[in-house]
Image: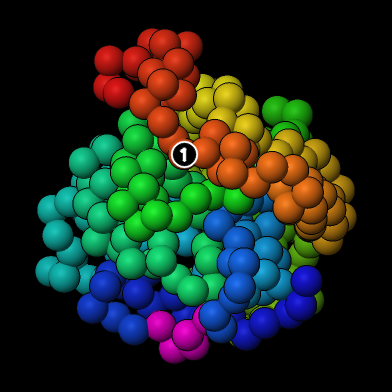
Amino acid sequence: MNSRELNDRAAWLRGPSAECSVVPERLEQPWRLVLLGPPGVGKGTQARLLTQRLGACHLSTGDVFREAKTRNERQQTLAMSAALNSMRRGTLVPEAIVWQVIRERASCLRCQGGFVLDGFPRTLAQAKVLKLLLENERLSLDAVVNYELPLAEIVSRLSGRRTCQSCKAIFHLTAQPPRTEGVCDLCCGALYQREDDRPEAITVRLDAYQSSTAPLIQFCRNLGLLTPVVASGSPEEIFRRTATALEKRRKFDSESSVTSRKSARVWSPEMLACCGNESGNGKNF
Ligand code: AMP
């Protein structure tokens, strides 16, 4: 895995009318990944490391909503104001708004460098939208990486997390402090605590994860896509574990009968229905 120049994700963050500053190189076998795991488990940090080394694009729905926050109120649509209110409370953004955001940015899924989806899908209904989009594009996922960490460690990570206002790099007050307090090591931007990393929002977010996102894990396991990774230790350690798991998976994929495995990976109605039953949401599919 090599280090590559990151693009500014303009098309993702600002919508399809914006152009990315760096077009990812065309890859023979681009990686198309979904990252799952509770808030604070380090998905954002791992997504950055993965995109740097895989040449893929980091597609975070949370970053799209945070980007909207930087626009002045007159530039914000009603949908975006509603999304920002949900974010502040720590609850999930209403499905219709998330779907609109994703549909508008569907071209990012076709990116020739591949993608790392971080924060989407978060519900089974969103998984259905992703299924349709990928099927329409004749694309399939390579893996769904599921980061696992005990609850106490998650809470400590979230409350100590600080994010760069301009480049979105992530630090931690004790585990990964910046060289100068409050200043980003990478771009000298100001570091801030996300509103949804405050204690009152953390509990709400963990509850939202438990009820809406955890059922996805079984869903992805049934698809044969789930790749569990223990998320303890330093970001580099977690990254190495992720890279090893992904390389093993790709090696296994190329050695096994590709056709039958690929067909198992289509997000088929049977799979969706089966997981829906487990979560009580089956009727949506
Ligand atoms: P994240 O940066 O992924 O932790 O997302 C921050 C916040 O953005 C979440 O707590 C939600 O309020 C909102 N959000 C991000 N992605 C989604 C999504 N796929 N569905 C619903 N809400 C989302």
Q: Quadrant of residue 260?
A: top right
* Secondary structure of the residue carrying numbered label 1: loop
Who's the residue at 63% across and 33% down the image? 224
Judge whether residue 171 can be spotted in this image.
Answer: yes
Looking at the rendered structure, the kind of residue marked 1 is Val
How far across and down, in percent of the image, does residue 49 sit?
70, 66
Who's the residue at 18% across and 64% down the image? 76
**Mark 1 surroundings within 10 Å by alpha-carbon count, few (fewer than 14), some (14 through 19), many (20 or more):** some
Who's the residue at 62% across and 67% down the image? 29
Q: Is residue 33 magenta?
A: no
217 up-or-down from 279: above or below: below
How far across and down, in percent of the image, does residue 129 sit?
32, 41
159 up-or-down from 172: above or below: above
5 up-or-down from 148: above or below: below
Q: Is residue 113 left or right of residue 129?
A: right
Who's the residue at 44% across and 75% down the image? 9
How far across and down, in percent of the image, does residue 246 sit?
75, 52
Q: Is residue 124 left or right of residue 51?
A: left
Judge whether residue 156 can be spotted in this image.
Answer: no
Q: Nearer the viewer, residue 114 or 91?
A: 114
Q: Report the predominant secondary structure element of the magenta stretch.
A: loop
Q: Quadrant of residue 80?
A: bottom left
Residue on which the image places disc 1: 266
Q: Nearer the viewer, residue 198 or 138?
A: 138
How far across and down, in percent of the image, does residue 173 sit?
74, 57
250 up-or-down from 226: above or below: below
